[in-house]
Image (tube, rainbow, N blue to C red):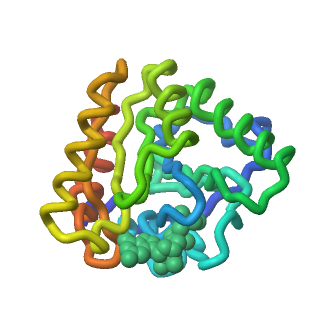
């Protein structure tokens, strides 16, 4: 496991762009539908049990949470989207904050977009992909909860998403992921180290 992932520290939660850290550190952002397994993924990658809070109650993370990785970089946990029981005005507000972060943040080098391997490419996932494409933001898609599928179906799901994304302008990778059986976890650790060393 790369050293840089060993000492992640929570820095701050930002409700609005004025609160984002003001420096030039590289950032890697994680986004996905609420309950997709984003907190679990961040915890698995950093080998921590409770760095990012996991919860069975979806929609809890309403801020953009910044975690430092040594002196060089940060992981950024974006608010989970698509949680039905949140008032429309609040949803719009989160979407605006996410949009602003994704399109206007100079620190951001890669988006890690998580989608449930059993039902990927929801409307809001597609919106995220559009924003990434428009901002020329390289995007790594992780198909989460891959432990729920047998190998054949897992491969088919990855290929189906790859096929869709090949039609979109931009740089997209697609990998299966599970924080339960650790599929893809080590690859992500190495990948993050690469992005930090060389940009995307
Ligand atoms: N089977 C399985 N369940 C998972 C996995 N990752 C997360 N979960 C479960 O999905 C639910 C939501 O996970 P969480 O990480 O809080 O999702 P978040 O809302 O995207 O941060 C929890 O009940 C987790 O235990 C996974 O890789 N496999
Ligand atoms: Mg979460």
Q: Is residue 38 left or right of residue 86?
A: left
Tell me where residue 13 sits by quadrant: bottom right
Residue that protrudes farthest toward the left in the picture:
152
Q: Is residue 27 above or below residue 189?
A: above
Residue 47 visible (yes or no) = no
Residue under the image location 52 percent in, 49 percent down: 31
Choose between 104 and 147: the one closer to the eye.
Answer: 147
- In the image, residue 61 sits, relative to residue 75, either above or below, namely below
Q: Nearer the viewer, residue 163 or 172?
A: 163
Whether residue 181 sits left or right of residue 142 in the image: it is left
- Answer left or right for 139 relative to 152: right
The residue depicted at 31 percent of the width and 33 percent of the height is 164
Tell me residue 150's x, y (percent). 19, 70
The x, y position of residue 186, in whole percent, is 23, 63
Looking at the rendering, which quadrant does residue 136 occupy?
Answer: top left
Residue 83 appears in the rendering:
yes
Residue 4 horizontal/vertical position (percent)? 35, 58
Q: Which residue appears at 50% of the width and 19% of the height?
A: 134
Ligand 2's image quarter is bottom right
Picture coordinates of residue 152, whole percent (x, y): 13, 62
In the rendered view, would you say 114 is above or below 44? above
Q: Quadrant of the C terminus?
A: top left
Q: Quadrant of residue 194?
A: top left
As drawn, is 14 to the left or to the right of 167? right
At a point 45% along the width and 23% down the height, the residue shown is 133
């Amino acid at each position: 496991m790369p050293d840089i992932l060993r000492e992640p520290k929570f820095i701050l939660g930002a409700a609005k762009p004025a609160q984002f850290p003001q420096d030039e550190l590289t950032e890697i952002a994680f986004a996905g539908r609420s309950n997709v397994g984003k907190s679990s993924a961040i915890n698995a990658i950093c080998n921590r049990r409770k760095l990012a809070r996991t919860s069975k109650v979806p929609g809890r993370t309403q801020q953009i949470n910044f975690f430092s990785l040594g002196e060089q970089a940060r992981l950024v946990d974006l608010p989970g989207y698509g949680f039905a029981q949140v008032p429309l005005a609040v949803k719009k507000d989160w979407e605006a904050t996410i949009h602003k972060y994704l399109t206007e943040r100079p620190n951001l080098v890669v988006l890690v977009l998580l989608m449930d391997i059993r039902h990927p490419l929801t409307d809001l996932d597609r919106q995220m992909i559009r924003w990434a494409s428009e901002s020329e933001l390289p995007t790594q898609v992780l198909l989460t909860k891959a432990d729920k599928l047998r190998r054949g179906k897992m491969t088919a799901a990855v290929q189906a998403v790859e096929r869709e994304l090949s039609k979109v302008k931009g740089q997209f990778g697609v990998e299966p992921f599970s924080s339960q059986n650790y599929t893809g976890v080590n690859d992500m650790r190495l990948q993050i180290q690469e992005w930090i060393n060389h940009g995307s």
